[in-house]
Each structure stands twice: as C-alpha cells, then as structure tokens.
Image (cartoon, grey):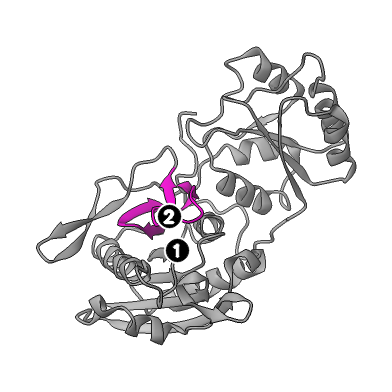
Amino acid sequence: MNFLLLTTGGTIASVPSGNGLAPALPGEKLIEACPLLADFEHGLVIVDLFSKDSSNMNPLDWLEMAKTVRRCARGCHAAVLLHGTDTLAWTASALSFLLHDVSVPVVITGSMLPPGEFGSDSADNIYAAFQFALQLAMYKRRGVSVAFADALIHGPRATKIDSCRKKAFVSVDYPLLGEMKDKGSHKIAWLTPHAPKFSERCPWGASPVFETNIALTPIFPGMKAAALDAVAAAAPRAVVLEGYGLGGVPFMGESLLEPIERGIEAGIPFVLRTQSPFGGTDPSVYEVGRRALDLGVISARDMTRESLVTKLMLLLPLCGREELAERLGTALCGEAALDC
C-alpha cells in the first residue's frame, strides 16, 4: 500500500525559538523521530504543505489541504495529516465536508507536546494515525477522522476540550471509530463496527467557496438586547447563537427575542445551538426555545460548533435563508444525527 503524509506545522512539528515554540520540523524528521514506524513496510509520499501554528490556519488552507489530498488520492490508499491541535477539530470538520466523496481515508493527528520534549505524545500519535489509516484502507472505509490519545474520532464529531492534557479531544454524541489496544509489548489499531454514512450529494460542487462573515455569539445571564442588535448591525451573513441547555433564549426581563426578530427581518439567518458540550439542541422542548423557533430561528440539532460553522461557511454562498435551513439539516457525512 501507499500512504500520503501531509504536514502543516503545529506543536507536533515545533521546536523552541526566541518567541516560544514554533513549527519548523519537516515530515521526514517527524517520521525519523517515530521509531515505532521502523517496521512500517509501505510506500510513503511526504508533502510538507505548511509550517504554521494552527491558530494561523484559515479556510484557504483547508482548500489547499483538500486539493492536495484529491491530487494524491489516485496513487495512495490513505492519507495522514499532521496538524496543530488548536484548530485541528475545525480542519477535521471542514475536510469532512470538502472530502466526503473521496474514497481514501484521511487521518488527522497532532500532539500536545513537541517531539523533543520529555513525555511527548508526538511519536505515539503519529504511530496510531498510520496504524488506523492502514486498517481503514484495508477495510475500505473512507472519511476524515482524528487519531489522538489512542482513540479514533469521526472528523465532524471531534472537538478539543482540554488545552494542555494529552487526552485533549472527545467525540461528541458519536461512537468512537477505533481504539489502540495493548498487544504484548506494543499496541494495535482496532476498528469498531461503527462506520459513518456518506451522502453522494455535494452541494458546493468542484469549486467550493467559504463565507467567513459569520457571527458566533454566546448568550449569558443579563445579556443586553442592544448587544445582539450590534451584532446584527455589523451585517453578518449569518449569526450562530449559543443558547442555554437544549437551546433556551431568555424572553423575560431583558428579552433577546426582539433583536433576533429584527435581525431575521433584515434577512440575517439565526442558527441556534446549545452551549453544552454534549446532548445537542432541540429548542422545541421548552418555551424559551420554541418562541425562538416561531421567529424563524434554525436549530443546529446535534452538530458541534466546528461542524456547524464550517458547514455554514460552505452553504451560505449557495442558498438563501429558507433553503439554508433544509440544507443545514441534511446530513452529508455523519455530522448530524438523522433522527434529530
């Protein structure tokens, strides 16, 4: 089999510099620093695409990653992408949409500690990513996934929940796709029976465009209606509103329904999601959510923040508010439950 290794920088490629840790190591050096791959008897093509801290990643970078994977997919059975952890979940969601029709699996990983630091998780995560990629290729499973801390997470369901510990990522309301399990002196990649479903439709076609003029606004107790009016006054293409619980929006005292209504009347779609990490959004359960639905607010269902916003970025250039609700609610690659 042949594998593509795509590097983009991040902690996993970082070394100390005068301004703190900065990415500098190419893919060849990272493979050399992973002795567990010494017996990996498969072809390997290394493409050093970027050398960025992932905080500097942007949608144009996602398009370049997707283009590179598509170009190399004809000659490779799987791809491993090395990435910084801070925006890794955002990239995993974006690539899940951009590559949902690509037949080869893409496994993304990074590390919380750089290769040269004591106790670094870089070598273990690189090894796990290749082992998972091998298993996915052997069983002809496609899609984008995240390999981190011995777990394999479906790309559009991954989110970073810890800024410093090695188990930094979790799968949100979705089963793990695989785990690394002990076998004597080493670990092996074990895939679970769960395999994501993929739609054959690709709404954005062969030349996707990302609309980044989106406002992401959490609600907090005592929030002023004028603050939400100010958000709408900036003329975003859409507002993602993070409400309480299943999607609660306060309407007593300082009501936030009036600025939402004014924004919707001005042609701005409002998408409501929960602030809770797990459980998803269902504004129809409580009055504080149903009143918002009655105004025309769109439910984010059980999508993560990363998958919701990146999907919005891709859909907004294509459709108006009414069509947006339908397309946003249509699962393309397991980013939302079909029964929500």
Q: CA distance from mark 2 to mark 1?
A: 7 Å
Indicate the secondary structure of the residue bearing disc 1: loop
Q: In the shown orientation, is residue 226 left or right of residue 114?
A: right
Q: Residue at x 62, y 70 (%)?
A: 61
Q: In the rendering, at what x and y percent does residue 26 appear?
A: 47, 85
Q: How many marks?
A: 2
Magenta highlight range: 144-171
**Up-down: is 243 above or below 16?**
above
Q: Residue at x 61, y 22 (%)?
A: 283
Q: Residue at x 45, y 63 (%)?
A: 112
Q: In the shown orientation, is residue 172 left or right of residue 270?
A: left
Residue matched to label 1: 112
Q: Is residue 14 visible?
A: yes
Question: What amino acid type should be assigned to the residue bearing mark 2?
Answer: Arg
Closer to us: 255 or 299: 255
Residue located farthest toward the left when viewing the structure as drawn: 184
Q: Is residue 207 visible?
A: no
Q: In the rendering, at what x and y percent does residue 221 appear?
A: 72, 25
**Up-down: is 7 above or below 337?**
below
Q: Are marks 2 and 1 in contact (CB under 8 Å)?
A: yes
Residue matched to label 2: 165
Q: In the rendering, at what x and y percent does residue 34 appear?
A: 30, 78
Whether residue 156 is in magenta: the answer is: yes
